[in-house]
Image (cartoon, grey):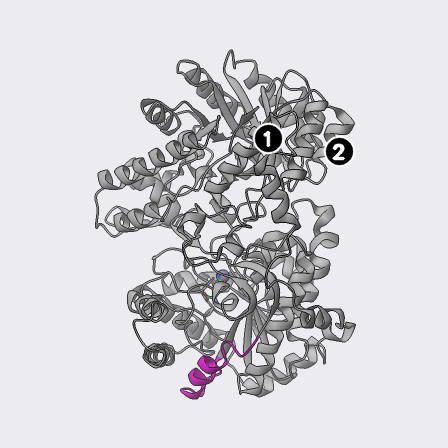
C-alpha cells in the first residue's frame, strides 16, 4: 500500500512566505531573497513528507500567490494589460494577483473568487481573443528538478485542462470552445516535455468534476483526455478530484486511460455507492481520499480501515490519500504550546495528517490491525467523552426555538418607511464595511495586551483613542453612517469565538485565505453560548462621540460557523443555531444601549453552499437563512439591520438572500461585472443594497470619475432610494493614506451624483 497527498500548506510553517512576500512588495528585500525563502520552504516541506513516509510527494503545489494562476501563467494565459507593463515575470505575476500602480502603469488585479466550497480564494485567469495558449513557463519542471536535486522524486501537480477551461474568464468574443484545441496542444506539450525527465507520476487536479455536469461538459472532458492520454507513454497520469463525488462522470472517468483516479471519500457522499454500483477498473490505482484535508479532527481509524479493507477485498488497488489538499488546514500542531493535551489529542493538522496516512498504511498492511497499539489508541480516543463539551442549558434553548423566533415584525416595507423617517439619511448614503486600517500600532497594542505587557486600561485607552480618531476622520471625510473601526479585532470570527463558551483557540494555526493573507480559524469544541456582552462598550463609546448613526458590528452565525473548524459530533445546523442565539443576545444588548444600526456580517454565507444545486436548499439554505433571521427577529422596527457579503455571486440564490430579511445589504461588486444588478431587479429584490464601488483588496486609489461611473451603472438598475455607497469590504488590510484618499473620492462621487439626481 502507498500513501499520497494532494498538496501541502505553502506559506510555510510559520508563514515565512507571507512575511517575505510582503517585504518584497514593500521593496524591503530583493527578488533573489524572496526566491531563497521560497526555496527553503519547499525543501523543508519535501523533507518533512519524506520523513513521514509519504510515497507520492507532490511538487508544484507551492505558489507565490495561487496555483490556478500559476497554471494559467505556465501556459501563457496572461492578459496583455499585464504583459504591457514590461515587468519581470514574477512582478507580472504579482501584478495579476494584486494590481499594479507605479512607474510602469496602472492596472487592476484579476478577479478573485472563492475556491469551491472553501475559504480559500483563487485568482480568476482571463483569456483574451488573441491569447496564445502555449507552454511557456517552466515552474512545474523547475520545482520537480529542485526536489530531485535533493534526492526526492516528486509527483508534479497541476490544474487539469478541463477545470482550467471551466474556471477561466473569457473576456473577448471567443469563448471556451474556441480554446479547447490550443489548450489540448499546450498540455500535450507538457506531457511530452515531462517524458524527457524523470517524472513518473503527474497529477492533474480536476475538482470541477464534482459539480453538476452537463452532457457538453462530459463530452469535453472525454475529448480532452482521450487525446491527452494517447500521448502519455510511460508517464503515469493521476486525475485528482476533491470536494465531492463525481456521480455525473464516474463511468466515463473510469473508462479513460488514467493510471490513477483520486476520489473524495469525505465530502463525496456517493463515492462509495458509485464504486459499489459501477465497480472500479483493476488496472488502475484508486487514490482513496480518506484523511480529511479540511478539518482538524483526528481520523477515525476504524471507519477508514473498514473502507480500505472493503476496497482491498473488492480487489481494487488503492493508495491512501487525503480528501483534498492540506492547504486548508494549519501546518502543524507542534506550534501549539498552550492547548492542553486533553484537547490536542483529538486534533491532526497537516503534519499530523501525514502521520495518520502513514499509520493507516501500516495498519492496512497487517492481517489483523485490531490489536495494534496505534489502532487501540485511536479507538480509545473516539470512545472517550470529550472534556467540557456539552452544556444542557444550550441544548434546551435550541430545542425551545419556535417559528416566531425566525420572524421579524413588521414586514420589510413598513420598516423601511419607519427607518427613513427616523434616520433622515441623504440619498446615496455613504458608509464603510466596518474595519479601518490595522496599522502596526493597532496590532502592537493588541499583541502587547495579549502578552500581558500592558494593562487592560492601557489597552482600552489606546483603542478608544483610535476610535476617536476614526470617528473624527469619518466626519471630516463626510461619511453618513459611521463605524468604530474594529481595532479590537484580529479577525471577524476569532474575536467573537474568544468571547463565546465552547470555542478553542490556537496560537499559530494559520490557514491561507488568499495570496499572503492567512486566517486562524477557531475550533468549535463544544456547545456555544455567550457569557457576557462582547462589543457593546466599544460601540457605545464610539456612538457617544458623534451625532451620526454608529453601526454596531457583529459577525453572523453562518459565517462564524463557516470560518471555524466545525464539530463532527453534532450537526452544523445545531451548532449554527447555538451560535445564532448567542449573537442574538448581543444584538439585543446593542439595541438596548442606544445602537440603532447593527451590521451582522455574513461574509461567508455563500461559501458553504453545496456545489450541487440539488443540495442547495435541503442541505444548507433551509437552515442557514433561518439562522440569520433568528439573530435579528426580536429587534424594534426602527432598528436598522445591515448585512455584508464578500462576494456578489448570489445571482442564483437572490430569493434566499432577500429572505434573510435584513434592511440593507452591502456586498463586493467592484471586482466582478455588475450582472448581479439585473438579477436583483428581475427578482424584485426588496432589501436596500450597497454594491461595493471600489476594490479594497488592492492599494489602488479609485478616482471620483471611476466611482461615479460605477454608481451610474448601478443607478440604471437600482432605485436611488435603495442604493448605498460603500467600498466592497472592510479596510483593515489597507494603509491609512490610500484609505483616506479613496473614501474622500467615494464621498465626493456620492455628493456629485446627489446634486444631479
Ligand atoms: N466588518 C468586517 C470588516 O470590515 C467585514 C469583513 C469581511 O467582510 N470580510 O472588516
Ligand atoms: Zn467583505
Mark 1 or 2, nearer chain start:
2
Circles 1, 2 touching at the beta carbon (< 8 Å): no
Q: Position of residue 725 (x, y in %)?
A: 48, 69
| Closest to the observer, 741 or 494 | 494
Q: Mark 2, residues whose alpha carbon is within 10 Å: few (<14), some, or many (≥20)? A: few
Relative horizontal placement of residue 40, taking residue 627 as reference (left or right): left
Q: Residue at x 46, y 82 (%)?
A: 537
- Tell me: residue 267, above or below residue 420: above
Vertical arrangement, residue 224 with respect to residue 374, above or below:
above
Of tags 1 and 2, the one toward the viewer is 1
State the quadrant of the N terminus: top right
The residue at which mark 2 appears reads as 273
Label 1 crowding class (10 Å Cα cut-off): few <14, some 14-19, many 20+?
many
Confirm whether the magenta stretch covers residue 535. Answer: yes
Q: How far across and how far down the image is residue 670, in percent?
A: 47, 57
Q: Which mark is residue 363?
A: 1
Residue 324 place in picture, x, y as percent: 55, 38
Height in image: 162 above or below 103? above
| Residue interval drawn in magenta | 531-550
Tell me where residue 447 appears, x and y as whole percent. 34, 66
Q: Is residue 139 left or right of residue 495?
A: left
Amino acid at each position: 500500500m502507498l500513501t499520497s497527498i494532494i498538496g501541502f500548506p505553502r506559506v510555510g510553517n510559520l508563514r515565512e512566505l507571507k512575511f517575505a512576500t510582503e517585504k518584497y512588495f514593500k521593496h524591503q528585500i530583493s527578488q533573489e531573497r524572496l526566491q531563497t525563502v521560497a526555496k527553503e520552504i519547499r525543501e523543508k516541506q519535501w523533507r518533512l513528507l519524506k520523513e513521514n513516509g509519504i510515497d507520492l510527494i507532490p511538487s508544484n503545489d507551492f505558489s507565490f500567490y495561487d496555483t490556478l494562476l500559476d497554471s494559467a501563467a505556465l501556459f501563457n494565459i496572461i492578459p496583455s494589460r499585464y504583459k504591457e507593463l514590461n515587468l519581470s515575470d514574477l512582478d507580472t505575476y504579482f501584478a495579476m494577483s494584486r494590481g499594479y500602480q507605479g512607474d510602469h502603469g496602472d492596472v487592476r488585479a484579476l478577479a478573485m473568487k472563492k475556491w469551491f466550497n472553501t475559504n480559500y480564494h483563487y485568482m480568476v485567469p482571463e483569456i483574451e481573443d488573441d491569447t496564445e495558449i502555449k507552454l511557456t513557463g517552466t515552474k512545474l519542471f523547475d520545482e520537480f528538478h529542485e526536489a530531485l536535486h535533493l534526492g526526492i522524486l516528486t509527483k508534479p501537480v497541476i490544474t487539469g485542462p478541463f477545470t482550467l477551461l471551466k474556471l477561466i474568464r473569457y473576456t473577448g468574443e471567443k469563448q471556451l470552445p474556441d480554446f479547447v484545441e490550443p489548450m489540448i496542444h499546450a498540455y500535450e506539450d507538457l506531457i511530452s516535455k515531462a517524458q524527457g525527465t524523470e517524472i513518473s507520476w503527474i497529477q492533474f487536479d480536476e475538482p470541477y468534476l464534482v459539480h453538476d455536469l452537463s452532457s457538453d461538459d462530459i463530452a469535453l472532458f472525454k475529448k480532452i483526455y482521450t487525446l491527452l492520454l494517447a500521448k502519455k507513454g510511460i508517464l503515469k497520469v493521476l486525475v485528482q478530484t476533491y470536494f465531492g463525488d463525481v456521480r455525473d462522470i464516474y463511468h466515463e472517468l473510469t473508462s479513460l486511460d488514467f493510471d490513477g483516479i483520486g476520489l473524495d471519500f469525505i465530502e463525496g457522499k456517493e463515492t462509495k455507492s458509485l464504486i459499489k454500483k459501477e465497480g472500479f477498473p483493476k488496472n488502475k490505482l484508486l487514490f482513496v481520499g480518506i484523511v480529511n484535508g479540511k478539518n482538524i479532527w483526528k481520523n477515525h481509524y476504524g471507519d477508514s480501515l473498514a473502507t480500505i479493507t472493503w476496497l482491498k477485498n473488492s480487489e481494487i488497488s488503492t493508495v491512501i490519500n487525503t480528501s483534498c489538499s492540506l492547504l486548508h488546514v494549519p501546518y502543524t500542531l507542534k506550534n501549539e504550546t498552550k492547548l492542553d493535551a486533553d484537547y490536542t489529542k483529538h486534533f491532526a493538522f497537516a503534519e499530523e495528517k501525514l502521520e495518520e496516512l502513514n499509520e493507516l498504511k501500516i495498519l492496512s498492511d497487517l492481517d489483523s490491525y485490531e490489536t495494534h497499539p496505534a489502532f487501540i489508541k485511536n479507538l480509545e480516543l473516539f470512545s472517550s467523552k470529550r472534556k467540557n463539551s456539552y452544556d444542557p442549558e444550550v441544548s434546551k434553548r435550541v430545542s425551545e426555538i419556535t417559528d416566531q423566533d425566525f420572524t421579524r415584525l413588521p414586514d420589510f416595507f413598513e420598516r423601511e418607511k419607519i427607518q427613513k423617517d427616523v434616520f433622515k439619511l441623504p440619498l446615496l448614503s455613504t458608509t464603510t464595511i466596518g474595519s479601518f486600517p490595522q496599522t502596526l500600532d493597532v496590532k502592537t497594542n493588541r499583541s502587547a495586551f495579549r502578552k500581558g505587557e500592558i494593562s487592560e486600561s492601557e489597552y482600552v485607552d489606546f483603542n478608544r483613542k483610535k476610535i476617536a480618531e476614526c470617528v473624527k476622520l469619518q466626519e471630516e471625510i463626510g461619511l453618513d453612517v459611521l463605524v468604530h473601526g474594529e481595532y479590537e479585532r484580529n479577525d471577524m470570527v476569532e474575536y467573537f469565538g474568544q468571547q463565546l463558551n465552547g470555542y478553542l483557540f490556537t496560537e499559530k494555526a494559520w490557514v491561507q485565505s488568499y495570496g499572503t493573507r492567512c486566517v486562524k480559524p477557531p475550533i468549535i469544541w463544544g456547545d456555544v453560548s455567550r457569557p457576557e456582552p462582547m462589543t457593546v462598550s466599544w460601540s457605545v463609546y464610539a456612538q457617544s462621540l458623534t451625532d451620526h448613526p454608529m453601526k454596531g458590528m457583529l459577525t453572523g452565525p453562518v459565517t462564524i460557523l463557516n470560518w471555524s473548524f466545525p464539530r463532527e459530533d453534532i450537526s452544523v445546523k445545531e451548532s449554527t443555531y447555538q451560535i445564532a442565539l448567542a449573537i442574538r443576545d448581543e444584538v439585543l444588548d446593542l439595541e438596548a444601549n442606544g445602537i440603532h444600526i447593527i451590521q451582522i456580517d455574513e461574509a461567508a454565507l455563500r461559501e458553504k453552499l453545496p456545489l450541487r444545486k440539488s443540495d442547495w436548499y435541503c442541505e444548507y439554505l433551509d437552515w442557514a437563512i433561518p439562522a440569520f433571521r433568528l439573530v435579528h427577529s426580536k429587534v424594534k422596527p426602527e432598528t436598522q439591520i445591515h448585512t455584508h457579503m464578500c462576494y456578489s455571486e448570489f445571482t442564483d440564490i437572490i430569493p434566499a438572500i432577500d429572505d434573510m430579511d435584513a434592511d440593507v445589504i452591502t456586498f463586493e461588486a467592484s471586482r466582478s461585472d455588475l450582472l448581479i444588478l439585473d438579477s436583483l431587479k428581475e427578482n424584485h429584490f426588496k432589501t436596500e443594497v450597497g454594491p461595493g464601488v471600489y476594490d479594497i483588496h488592492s492599494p489602488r486609489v479609485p478616482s471620483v470619475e471611476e466611482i461615479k461611473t460605477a454608481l451610474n451603472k448601478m443607478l440604471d438598475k437600482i432605485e436611488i432610494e435603495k442604493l448605498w455607497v460603500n467600498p466592497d469590504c472592510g479596510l483593515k488590510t489597507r494603509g491609512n493614506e490610500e484609505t483616506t484618499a479613496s473614501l474622500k473620492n467615494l464621498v465626493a462621487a456620492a455628493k456629485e451624483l446627489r446634486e444631479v439626481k
